[in-house]
Image (cartoon, rainbow, N blue to C red):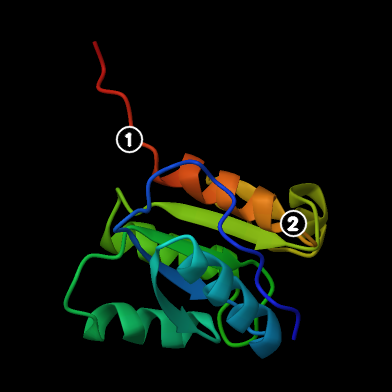
Amino acid sequence: MPAVPPASSPFPRSPATILVVEDEDALRALIVRMLAAEGYATLEAGDGRRALAVLEQFEGDVDLVVLDMVMPLMDGGRLAAELLRRNPSRRLLAMSAYAPAELADLGLESPDAPFLRKPFTPAQLYRQVREALAPIPEPS
């Protein structure tokens, strides 16, 4: 497995906790290592059902769920819908090798969430995660 590049952002390390849901073990491990190198606490799951179990068992707050859209047992669209049903303010970052239009052609509904197209660079992952975790402006 390739080495994780050193943290590249000038931003302070975040205390955020991120759940990575990806069915490809090697890719999930790489994403977890990249996020940990940026200072994030990470949890991981290999499918949607396991992700729900991890969230139920974890006693802290999960600030962001990074989820693959194409997975066995429970696809990313169904997982996103269930996560938002349980917590409407849950922050999500969807990822897939398929574009959102291609996911729709496959019968998968892409959540209304930021989207990261695979393959991606560490810089693209870090940027999308920072954006997904950015404070939501208060309505004026």
Residue at position x 24%, y 10% in the image: 140
Residue 105: x %, y % from top left? 82, 57
Residue 133: x %, y % from top left? 40, 46
Spatial distance from mark 1 to mark 2, Cα to Cα? 24 Å
Residue 47: x %, y % from top left? 54, 84
The picture quadrant where one finds residue 25 is bottom right
Report the residue marked by disc 2: 121
The picture quadrant where one finds residue 51 is bottom left
Mark 2 surroundings: few (<14), some (14-19) or many (≥20) residues within 10 A? few
Farthest-out residue, left: 59
Residue 1: x %, y % from top left? 74, 86
Q: Amino acid at mark 1?
A: Pro
Q: Which marked residue is nearer to the observer: mark 1 or mark 2?
A: 2
Q: Is residue 67 above or below residue 133?
A: below
Q: Is residue 55 above or below residue 127?
A: below
Q: Amino acid at mark 2?
A: Thr
**Element carrying mark 2:** loop
**Element carrying mark 1:** loop
